[in-house]
Image (cartoon, helix red, strand yellow):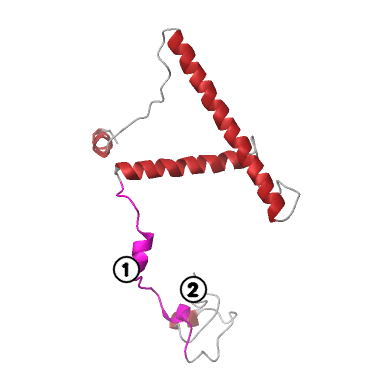
Amino acid sequence: MLTCPALLGKLRCPLRPVSMALAFSRPEVLAPPEHPQACCTQTTITVPASVNQKTAQRHDYPGKAWRRSYARRSAAERANSRIKDPATVDVARGWCRLMGRTPMALWLACAIVVRNFAVADAFALRREDSRRRIAAGRPPRTRRRRRTTIAQLAGASANTAP
């Protein structure tokens, strides 16, 4: 995003009278262009409807399809954070001494394979634990998620003491 340097306070420009109040130590545009750039003349832009169609959300916000899509995004973010975690694979700045696309792609593919094996091992352990608990007559562990509606949250905050 480009902004007029006079609006940023970097120089004095006769096209922007407010900038002329800056100190004389700032550079000054002595001969402003006859047709200045858009960043010097516009303050807002108008986005056509065709662009809005490309950037609009695919699913309604609180809907089931949106939650499913958001959960998929969370899984992708978990995968990225697991690969970048210094305690595990540690794909960070300077993690590979080799240069070029091919060695980096190969190392990154290996890092993803290591992450996938760790996820598969954790899944197998959870599954075995569930089988063991069922065989012992205890119910398997479940992941409890708190489902609180907006009405419950609003009611709780309205009834609490300040």
Which residue is denoted by mark 1 in the rendering? 49
Q: What x and y, as percent, mark residue 159?
A: 24, 33
Q: CA distance from mark 2 to mark 1?
A: 24 Å
Crowd tier of the residue under label 1, counting other residues whose Cα lies within 10 Å: few below 14, some 14–19, many 20 or above: few
Q: Amino acid at mark 1?
A: Ala
Q: What x and y, as percent, mark residue 141?
A: 43, 19
Q: Quadrant of the C terminus?
A: top left
- The residue stretch that appears in magenta: 35-61
Q: Nearer the viewer, residue 115 or 148?
A: 115
Left/right placement of residue 2 relative to residue 86 reads left
Left/right placement of residue 146 relative to residue 17 reads left
Q: What x and y, as percent, mark residue 103?
A: 71, 50
**Please, is residue 138 above or below residue 127 in the view?**
above
Q: Amino acid at mark 2?
A: Thr
Mark 2 or mark 1, whichever is nearer to me: 1
**Quadrant of residue 121 within the rendered picture:** top right
Crowd tier of the residue under label 2, counting other residues whose Cα lies within 10 Å: few below 14, some 14–19, many 20 or above: few
Disc 2 on helix, strand or loop?
loop
Q: Which mark is residue 117?
A: none
Total tally of numbered discs in the picture: 2
User: Residue visible at 56% across and 85% down?
Assistant: 28
Disc 1 on helix, strand or loop?
helix
Q: What x and y, as percent, mark residue 155?
A: 23, 36
**Is residue 82 in the magenta section?**
no
Q: Is residue 85 visible?
A: no
Which residue is denoted by mark 2 in the rendering? 3
**Is residue 42 in the magenta section?**
yes
**Please, is residue 111 above or below residue 47 in the view?**
above
Q: Nearer the viewer, residue 100 or 149?
A: 100
Left/right placement of residue 143 relative to residue 11 reads left
